[in-house]
Image: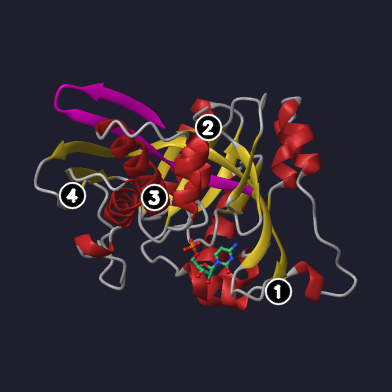
Amino acid sequence: MHIHRSMSGVEVWAPAKLNLFLEVLAKRTDGYHEIETLMVPVDWYDTLRLSACSSGRVSLTCRLAAGSRVTASADPFELPPAADNLAVRAVELLRQRSGVEQGAQIELTKRIPLASGLAGGSSDAAAALVAANAAWNLGYNGEQLADIGAELGSDVPFFIHGGPAVCRGRGERVEPVRDLAPMHFVVARPPVGLSTPAVYGRCRPADGSPGHGPQRVGPLLDALRIGDLGRAGRLLHNALMQAAEQLSTWIGRLKHEFAAAGCLGHQMSGSGTSYFGLCRHARHAQRLAAALRSRGIAQVQAVAGSY
Ligand code: C5P
């Protein structure tokens, strides 16, 4: 997350994330699932500008950046009304908790596709908390903002901490990881998204699959720390993929396309439908992006780990 302060307010670049590893350990009694996931922020950003105002209200102007609109008419994931926007809800919550009397004007430019497993909404919410904290001079520390963020969504604390991290619990327990090799990816987001609760609702946790213990993230972290990208590619894992495949035929198609494209390894991100391939370097990612675009996959982007 990059933060710039100016006379007119605070601008935050809110990154997308990729899940290089996601194991579903168990279903919990509160409706969530216990997970272990390695998340990496990438240089694909929404931009959030926030300025304090005296109105006492929180307002939002939101636009999709050129080229970011998902074109298929089958896509039910249009931008939600402002009151449902997670960034607005984040600022409202911070306003309540802090008792601040000022309001805020938020301008959000969306580039990260919606309902795609890239956590654009959660990243916007984290950016909004950081921006409002700065604009209102509240002086909350990262831990306090992350606690408020966890009430809005399981992925929000990850973005407050910034950098790659292993996340546990329902995703809100963040353990930053350092010294990972630079990484380049090609990411494809098909024209139709998936709902996170629907995908989790269909997944089979590791504790309910006799004979199959959970996979652990350690070997992948080891490979990424020594820069063995070939091995890392083989260790990418996402326990939600089978459930997502049952809900969208795009997942099977992307798996096939990425296997043919020649990346070091490929996997779905989060609850889908975004799918990514690990590449040798930036040029490799760009070459594969061009190849996938020519195969008619809606939105394809070459990105790098942002840390
Ligand atoms: O936390 P968040 O609002 O992003 O979660 C959305 C939904 O995804 C939850 O209501 C739940 O159905 C599902 N979920 C889950 N286990 C997680 C994270 C999310 O079951 N660890």
Q: Secondary structure at mark 3?
A: helix
Mark 3–mark 1 distance (CA, rounded to whole Å): 26 Å
Q: Secondary structure at mark 2?
A: loop
- In the image, residue 145 above or below residue 223: below
Q: Pointer 1: what residue?
A: 204
Q: Secondary structure at mark 1?
A: loop
Is residue 186 in sight in this rendering? no
Residue situated furthest front in the rendering: 99
Mark 4–mark 3 distance (CA, rounded to whole Å): 14 Å
Give the number of the disc on residue 120.
3
Is residue 251 in sight in this rendering? yes
Query: Mark 2 is on which residue type?
Result: Gly
Residue at the (74%, 36%) spot, across then down: 221
Q: Earlier in the sequence, mark 4 or mark 3?
A: 4
On the image, the x and y values in percent for residue 24 come to 69, 63
Q: Quadrant of residue 227?
A: top right
Q: Earlier in the sequence, mark 1 or mark 4?
A: 4
Query: Mark 3 is on which residue type?
Result: Gly
Is label 4's Cβ within 8 Å of ligand 1?
Answer: no
Mark 1–mark 4 distance (CA, rounded to whole Å): 37 Å
Going by the image, does 199 lie left or right of 49?
Answer: right
Q: Pointer 2: what residue?
A: 305
Q: Which residues are magenta?
A: 1-20
Q: Pointer 4: what residue?
A: 63
